[in-house]
Image (cartoon, helix red, strand yellow):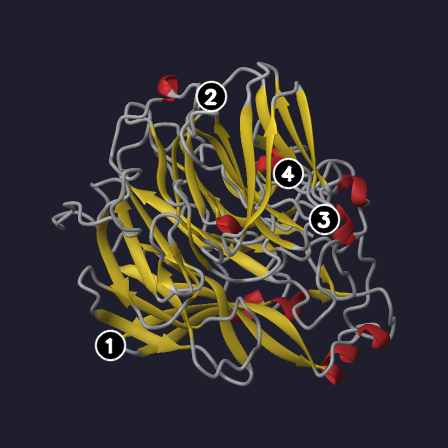
C-alpha cells in the first residue's frame, strides 16, 4: 500500500540557504494533496520571502495571476478589500540591517500597476514586517526607530545592557495616502513613551514593574530573544474597527499587546485619554507574564509566535485572535502549533485574574500534528480561519501551505516552488522557499470580482505529479503502523514498520548525491546518521516494486 508523495513533507530547520537543482523521480513541490470535496473553494496568495514576485494560484496549483515587483517583500503582502494588493518592500540602502526590514509600502492593482507607493526609510526610522489597510483607506504600519545609548540610560536601561550604538524602539504610525506617492501622518504611537524600570529611582519612569502592567520594562529580555539592537521584534499588526484598537505582537517578549487607537497622538504618549481612559498604555498583554514580573518561565504561553490577527465577524471563531506559535523554547521541544485566544472584554476593559494575568488561562489548540515534531517552522508563518470551518496554514519557514478540516485532516497541501532563484522545476530539491504570510480568498473577494480567474500554467512546470485530481483522503492508503521519525539534533532516524514491509531506504544530500542506501523490514528500524555532516537531506522510502512510499526532508545539525 502506498500514500501520496510528500503527504508528510517538512524541513525542520534551515542551517544554510541554498537551492539544489537536483532532480529525483519524486514530487518535491506543488499540490501534493487535494480532497476536492473537503477543501475550501478559493485562491491562494503568497509572496515568497526571497523573491520579488507575488503569486495567486487555484486549488490545483495553476497560476491565476502574478505581480512582478522588482523587490523582495518587507515582509507582508495580501489582497485588500479595496481590490488592491498591499505589499511591503525591501528598499535598496536600508538604514537598518535586518532580514525583517522593509522600508516601502505600496498599493498595486490586478495588472501590476502601482497605484501608490512611498518609502519609510530614514536614518531615524524604517518600516518593518507588517502593514494594514484600514477601512477608511489609511494604512498603519510597524517601524523601528533609533534610541541612542544616552537616551537608553535616561530611560533607565541598565548601563551594561545598553545597546551600542542604538536600541531599536518600536512605533506604530497611521498614514493617509495622498496622490501616487505622498502621505499625511494621521496618528502614531511610540513604545518608548511607555517604558518602565525599577533600576534608577531618580528617573521619572521609575516604578514597580509588577504593578505597572500597562507599561513595558526596558530591561526585560525574553527567553529566546536576541541580545542585540532588535530588543522587541514586533512582527504582527492588526486593527479592530469595532473596538478601535490595535493588536501588535512582540516576538522577543513572547507577548501579544493591544493598545487604544481612539486616542489622539498626544494622548497616545501618556496614560490617559481615549475610549479606555488609559492613553497609549497597554490595554491587554498575553503570553508571558514574566515580562512584567508576574510569572516565571512556567507561565510562558507564546514561543516566538507570528501572524496574530482578530478573526473577522461572520466567520467561525469571530472575535478570537488566531496565531502561529512557532515553538522557540517550548518546554516539550521545538515544534509548532496553531492557536486561538479569546480575551474577555467587559465594561470597557480586558478582564484579569487576581494574579494580574489576563484571560484566557490557556490557549485553544487549533492544530498540532499527530507527531508534533512533523510540524515545525522556526520563523515566519501564519494561519487563517476559513468560512467553511477549515483553517489555512502557512508553515512559512519550510514553504509548506496546507488546509485542515474540523477533524484536523489535511485536505490540501502545497509546497511552494519559488526561492531566491525564482520558480524551480518539479523534481528539484528546493530550499529557501519560505513565505512570511499566505492567504486564501474566495472568488467573491473584492480583489477578485470581475477578474479573469482562469487557470494558467503550473509555476513548477508540468509533470505527471501535478495533474489536478480528486485525491480524497479516503483514497490515501497509509500502511497501518508505518511512520518515520527524526528528532531535531539527534543522530537517529527511526522507522516504525508494524506490517514488516520489505522496503528500500535511500538518503540523498541536498546536491542529489546518494549518501545511504539500505533495506528495512523489521518492526523498528534505527538508522544511524552520525556519519552525516550538517545539512539538508532527502529521505526516500520505496517498495520493492520501486513505488514511492514516503519522502521526507530533514536537517541535521
Kind of element beneath mark 1: loop
Secondary element at tag 3: loop
Give the structural element (helix, strand or loop) at label 4: loop
Residue 371 visible? The answer is: no
Residue 93 relative to residue 526: left or right = left
Which mark is on residue 351? 4
Q: Nearer the viewer, mark 3 or mark 2?
A: 3
Residue that carries the numbered disc 2 in the rendered image: 407
Residue 281 vertical position relative to residue 537 in the rendered view, above or below: below
The residues tagged by marks 3 and 2 sit, at their Cα atoms, a distance apart of 40 Å
Image x and y of residue 310, in percent = 46, 43
Q: Which is more toward the observer, 506 or 555?
A: 506
Nearer the viewer's eye, disc 2 or disc 1?
2
Q: Nearer the viewer, mark 4 or mark 2?
A: 2
Looking at the image, tell me whether mark 1 or mark 4 is earlier in sequence order.
1
Q: Compute the Cα span from label 1 to label 3.
A: 61 Å
The answer to whether the residues at label 4 and label 2 have Cβ atoms under 8 Å apart is: no
**Residue identifier under label 1:** 179
The reply to whether discs 1 and 4 touch (Cβ–Cβ < 8 Å) is no
Q: Secondary structure at mark 2?
A: loop
| Viewer-closest of 374 and 357 | 374
Of mark 1 and mark 3, the one earlier in the sequence is 1
Q: Residue at position x 63%, y 71% from top?
A: 169
Give coordinates of residue 137: x percent, y percent: 30, 61
Left or right, residue 551 beside residue 86: right
Q: CA distance from mark 1 to mark 4?
A: 43 Å
Between 2 and 363, the residue placed more toward the observer is 2
Q: Residue at x 68, y 66 (%)?
A: 231
Q: Residue at x 56, y 68 (%)?
A: 171
Mark 4 or mark 3: whose residue is earlier in sequence: 4
Amino acid at each position: 500500500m502506498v500514500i501520496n508523495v510528500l503527504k508528510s513533507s517538512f524541513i525542520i530547520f534551515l542551517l544554510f540557504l541554498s537551492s539544489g537543482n537536483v532532480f529525483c523521480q519524486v514530487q518535491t513541490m506543488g499540490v501534493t494533496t487535494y480532497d476536492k470535496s473537503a477543501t475550501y473553494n478559493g485562491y491562494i496568495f503568497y509572496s515568497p520571502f526571497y523573491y520579488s514576485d507575488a503569486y495567486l494560484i487555484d486549488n490545483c496549483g495553476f497560476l491565476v495571476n502574478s505581480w512582478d515587483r522588482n523587490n523582495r517583500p518587507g515582509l507582508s503582502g495580501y489582497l485588500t478589500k479595496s481590490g488592491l494588493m498591499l505589499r511591503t518592500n525591501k528598499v535598496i540602502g536600508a538604514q537598518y540591517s535586518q532580514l525583517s526590514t522593509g522600508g516601502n509600502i505600496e498599493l498595486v492593482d490586478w495588472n501590476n500597476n502601482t497605484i501608490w507607493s512611498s518609502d519609510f526609510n530614514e536614518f531615524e526610522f524604517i518600516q518593518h514586517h507588517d502593514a494594514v489597510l484600514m477601512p477608511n483607506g489609511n494604512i498603519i504600519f510597524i517601524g523601528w526607530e533609533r534610541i541612542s545609548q544616552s537616551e537608553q540610560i535616561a530611560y533607565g536601561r541598565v548601563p551594561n545592557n545598553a545597546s551600542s550604538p542604538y536600541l531599536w524602539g518600536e512605533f506604530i504610525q497611521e498614514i493617509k495616502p495622498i496622490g501616487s506617492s505622498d502621505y499625511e501622518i494621521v496618528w502614531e504611537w511610540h513604545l518608548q513613551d511607555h517604558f518602565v524600570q525599577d533600576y534608577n529611582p531618580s528617573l521619572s519612569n521609575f516604578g514597580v514593574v509588577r504593578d505597572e502592567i500597562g507599561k513595558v520594562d526596558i530591561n526585560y529580555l525574553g527567553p529566546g530573544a536576541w541580545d542585540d539592537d532588535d530588543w522587541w521584534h514586533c512582527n504582527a499588526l492588526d486593527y479592530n474597527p469595532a473596538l478601535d484598537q490595535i493588536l501588535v505582537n512582540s516576538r522577543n517578549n513572547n507577548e501579544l499587546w493591544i493598545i487604544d487607537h481612539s486616542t489622539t497622538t498626544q494622548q497616545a504618549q501618556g496614560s490617559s485619554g481615549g475610549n479606555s481612559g488609559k492613553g497609549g498604555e497597554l490595554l491587554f498583554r498575553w503570553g508571558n507574564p514574566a515580562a512584567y514580573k508576574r510569572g516565571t518561565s512556567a507561565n510562558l504561553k507564546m514561543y516566538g509566535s507570528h501572524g496574530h490577527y482578530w478573526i473577522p465577524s461572520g466567520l467561525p471563531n469571530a472575535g478570537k485572535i488566531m496565531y502561529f506559535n512557532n515553538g522557540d523554547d517550548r518546554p516539550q521541544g521545538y515544534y509548532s502549533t496553531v492557536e486561538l485566544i479569546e480575551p474577555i472584554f467587559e465594561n470597557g476593559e480586558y478582564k484579569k485574574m487576581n494574579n494580574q494575568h489576563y484571560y484566557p488561562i490557556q490557549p485553544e489548540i487549533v492544530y498540532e500534528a499527530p507527531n508534533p515534531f512533523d510540524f515545525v517552522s522556526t520563523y515566519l508563518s501564519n494561519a487563517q480561519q476559513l468560512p467553511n470551518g477549515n483553517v489555512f496554514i502557512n508553515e512559512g519557514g519550510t514553504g509548506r501551505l496546507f488546509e485542515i478540516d474540523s477533524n484536523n485532516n489535511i485536505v490540501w497541501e502545497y509546497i511552494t516552488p519559488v526561492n531566491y532563484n525564482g520558480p524551480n522545476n518539479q523534481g528539484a530539491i528546493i530550499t529557501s522557499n519560505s513565505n512570511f504570510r499566505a492567504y486564501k480568498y474566495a472568488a467573491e473577494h473584492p480583489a477578485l470580482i470581475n477578474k479573469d480567474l482562469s487557470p494558467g500554467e503550473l509555476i513548477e512546470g508540468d509533470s505527471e505529479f501535478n495533474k489536478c485530481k480528486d485525491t480524497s483522503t479516503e483514497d490515501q492508503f497509509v500502511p497501518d503502523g508505518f511512520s518515520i521519525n527524526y528528532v531535531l539534533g539527534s543522530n537517529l532516524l527511526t522507522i516504525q514498520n508494524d506490517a514488516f514491509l520489505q522496503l528500500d531506504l535511500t538518503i540523498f544530500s541536498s546536491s542529489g548525491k546518494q549518501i545511504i542506501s539500505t533495506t528495512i523490514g523489521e518492526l523498528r528500524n534505527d538508522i544511524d546518521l552520525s556519519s552525516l555532516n550538517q545539512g539538508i537531506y532527502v529521505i526516500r522510502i520505496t517498495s520493492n516494486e520501486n513505488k514511492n512510499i514516503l519522502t521526507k526532508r530533514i536537517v541535521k545539525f
